[in-house]
Structure formats: C-alpha cells, structure tokens
Image (cartoon, rainbow, N blue to C red):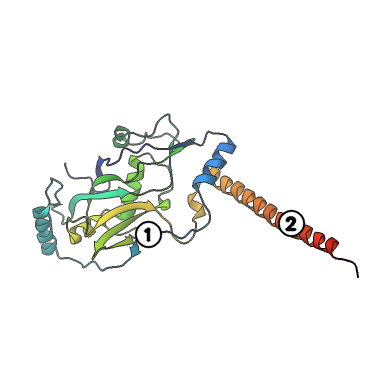
Amino acid sequence: MGEADAGTPSFEMTWNSTTSSGYCSQEDSDSELEQYFTARTSLARRPRRDQDEPVEWETPDLSQAEIEQKIKEYNGQINSNLFMSLNKDGSYTGFIKVQLKLVRPVSVPSSKKPPSLQDARRGPGRGTAVKRRTSFYLPKDAVKHLHVLSRTRAREVIEALLRKFLVVDDPRKFALFERAERHGQVYLRKLSDDEQPLRLRLLAGPSEKALSFVLKENDSGEVNWDAFSMPELHNFLRILQREEEEHLRQILQKYSYCRQKIQEALHACPLG
C-alpha cells in the first residue's frame, strides 16, 4: 500500500464476525422509537462486571536514531506485510488494528441496508445533508486494520472510522482504548485525544498481548447530553416522564395498601 496523505489515514478493513445487525429506523412511530430506547438505553449507572482494570504507563521520547532502530526491530518480528516505513521528513507510517466493542447501536443515513465494506471504502457522498437516520448494531468484535501516520491522533482515528462506515453519531460518544495483558491480568487505558496510536504500537512492538486498540463507547462518569441529537433528547424526556409516573404509581399503591391494612386492623379491634 502506498503512503497515506498527511491529513487522511488510509484503511484496510477486515471483518472477524458475521453477526447480523439489529435495525431500528428513526422513521418508525413514536411508540416503537420510545420502546427501542427504553429497551436499549439506560440512564442509570449500573456497576459493570468483569471490567478491565485501568492503568497508566509512561511512553518515553525517542530520538530519530532510536525510532529507526525500533522500526527495524518491529519489521523483523512480524509475520505479515503490515510493515512500518520511515519517511524522509522523520515521520513514519504503519498499521494499527482496532477492535470494535460497541454495545449500543450506531446511527447512519437512512437506507434500506447497512453500509457494506464497499460503501465504507467509497465514503459518504459529498454535499448531501443527513435528514433521516437508521440505527443498527455493528457486528461484535469487528476488527479494522488502519494505515496511519505516526502523527495521526487518537481522535482522528475515531473520526476516520466513523466516516468510513457512514456513522453520523457525534465522535465524542466514542473513545479509543489501549489494552494490555500482563501476568494474567488485563489492563485498559483510555487514550487522550492527542495521543498517537502508531507511536504506542511502535514502542510496544507487534505483540497483541503487549498492546491492542479497542473502540468503545465513551463512558465517563457523566452523560454528555450535548452529544445527542434532538430526537434522542426528546426520547429521553419521554422515558424519564414514564419512569417518574411509574414510580409515583408504585408509591401511591404501596401507601394505599398500608392504609387499607391499618383500617382493617382498626375495625377488627374491639371498642374500649
């Protein structure tokens, strides 16, 4: 593969799963749409099981000679043609593999079918505004090989992935993580927007146990409401109203039952 342009990573994509996607069109009726979000979206923060442990580790700065040596060592350890190449300006290009672990559906422009790999390679049409959306689940554990520059940032990787698959969700809904296995323990660290994934790949070497990249939902402690569309926000308000009404109904029913039992006990007690 030739060198990527300075600002645009190039991509080679591989599916490792044939899991079918679930659909939910935003052209559906309000009841269906509300039911969809009620079933798939929870505003409450639930504890997660088997969560990878977060960890932080330092990444040293390398001189140009050290980078050249690292690239030689890296290329000598891989068993494929996914080599790293040193450029004349001192930068380098190479491949990173990103595993998608998304538990929520993504939104794409409304169409009769989800984007195929050919659609993803062509990219979205220019000058077309997105008016309607269709939500569907990406195959679980899908894997993408990305050809990127050493200066490509984590945020640019996320944005490019979303563009390639016509995903119109706000990029802030997603985050890139690095995953490592050490002494039988799995560690996970969220990359900052400005970190350079290919640089991390070079420092760690080609071993997937030493380092791998995962795209996940950006679950910080708080909900970023600005990242949701207007239909989604209206949906959440309807969900909250329904939950509030149901909660009030249960409270009234509880106290009505208690009042009834107390009155029955009073009537059963002999006077005097």
Which residue is at the front of the view, 98 or 162? 98
Secondary-structure class at tag 2? helix
Q: Are marks 1 and 2 in contact (CB under 8 Å)?
A: no
Which residue is at the front of the view, 7 or 17? 17
Residue designated by label 1: 50
Res 143 → quadrant: top left
- For disc 2, the neighbor class at 10 Å (few under 14, some 14 to 19, many from 20) is few
Amino acid marked by disc 2:
Tyr
CA gap, disc 1 and disc 2: 41 Å
The dot on residue 225 is none
Total marks placed: 2
The N terminus sits in image quarter? top left
Q: Residue at x 28, y 58 (%)?
A: 179
Which residue is at the front of the view, 269 or 47? 269
Sequence-wise first label, 1 or 2: 1
Res 196 → quadrant: bottom left
Relative to residue 48, is residue 94 depicted above or below?
Answer: above
Amino acid marked by disc 1:
Asp
Q: Position of residue 124 (x, y in %)?
A: 36, 36
Q: Position of residue 22 (x, y in %)?
A: 43, 37
Q: Position of residue 232 (x, y in %)?
A: 53, 45
Relative to residue 6, is residue 190 depicted above or below?
Answer: below
Relative to residue 199, is residue 241 depicted above or below?
Answer: above
The C terminus sits in image quarter? bottom right
Relative to residue 200, is residue 137 depicted above or below?
Answer: above
Residue 130 appears anywhere in the view: no
Residue designated by label 2: 257
